[in-house]
Image: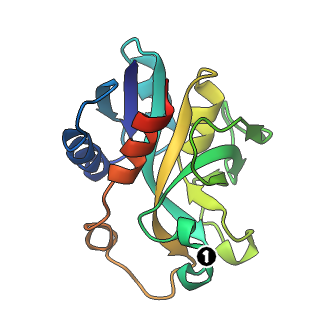
């Protein structure tokens, strides 16, 4: 199977490459693209992807709640699948006032809802276990039926202490996310 993987940041791309290199007897052929962060960057990237059987948006996820109160499968560095995406706080343009998009899961991972926003999100008003980012709604809006989103939990909102994001995520490994793709896609 030919798989396109879109990562919003170069650090995510590097982690995907590292994980793929460690998979023995790969079942799939991967093509990686870094889109850059944001709705528009995601949309532009999707317009110029090479042919594939499936496209996966794969990147970090900030999740609402405290890690110490999350179940094991929602701890730091764990992969999840986004099966519902919505938009908040965007003014004007193609995706304004979009209704939530729901899809069936493709992998055997925990399934969460994602909130895409360009504005500051007051996370205290959001349901615990909501993922907050800037790309998922655009991807869901433009994707093909077989395409899907995998996120790797990188931080918890609201932050209890200030973090240096790139230092904070340095030790996250995307191997479990790539293994889920390898072992669940036919």
Type of colouring: rainbow
Q: Residue lying furthest bottom in this view?
A: 161
Residue 151 location (% of width, % of height): 49, 51
Residue 32 location (% of width, % of height): 30, 31
User: In the shown orientation, is residue 43 left or right of residue 120?
Assistant: left
Foreground: 1 or 92? 1
The image quadrant that residue 139 belongs to is top right
Residue 82 location (% of width, % of height): 61, 46
Foreground: 128 or 78? 78
Foreground: 109 or 147? 109
Q: Which residue is drawn at 41% across and 48% down?
A: 177
Q: Residue lying furthest top in this view?
A: 51
Count all numbered tags in the image, as a single digit: 1
Q: Residue lying furthest front in this view?
A: 25
Q: In which quarter of the image is the N terminus?
A: top left
Q: Residue at x 71, y 35 (%)?
A: 103
Question: Is residue 92 visible to the viewer in this orientation of the structure?
Answer: yes
Does 169 appear above or below 20? Answer: below
The residue where tag 1 is placed is 70
Q: What element carries label 1?
A: loop
User: In the shown orientation, is residue 94 left or right of residue 31?
Assistant: right
Q: Residues within 10 Å of mark 1 (few under 14, many from 20)?
A: some
Does 152 appear above or below 7? Answer: below
User: In the shown orientation, is residue 90 left or right of residue 182?
Assistant: right
């Amino acid at each position: 199977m030919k798989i396109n993987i879109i990562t919003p940041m170069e650090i995510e791309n590097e982690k995907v490459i590292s994980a793929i290199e460690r998979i023995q007897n790969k079942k799939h052929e991967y093509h990686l693209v870094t889109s850059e962060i944001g709705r528009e960057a995601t949309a532009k990237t999707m317009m110029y992807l090479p042919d594939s059987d499936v496209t996966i948006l794969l990147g970090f996820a900030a999740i609402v709640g405290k890690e110490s109160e999350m179940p094991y499968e929602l701890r730091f560095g764990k992969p999840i699948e986004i099966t519902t995406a919505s938009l908040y706080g965007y003014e004007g343009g193609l995706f304004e006032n979009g209704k939530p998009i729901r899809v069936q899961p493709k992998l055997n991972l925990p399934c969460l809802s994602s909130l895409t926003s360009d504005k500051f999100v007051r996370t205290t008003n959001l349901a615990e276990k909501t993922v907050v980012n800037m790309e998922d709604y655009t991807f869901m809006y433009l994707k093909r039926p077989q395409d899907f989103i995998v996120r790797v939990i990188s931080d918890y909102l609201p932050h209890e202490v200030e973090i240096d994001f790139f230092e904070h995520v340095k030790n996250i490994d995307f191997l479990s996310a790539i293994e889920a793709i390898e072992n669940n896609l036919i």
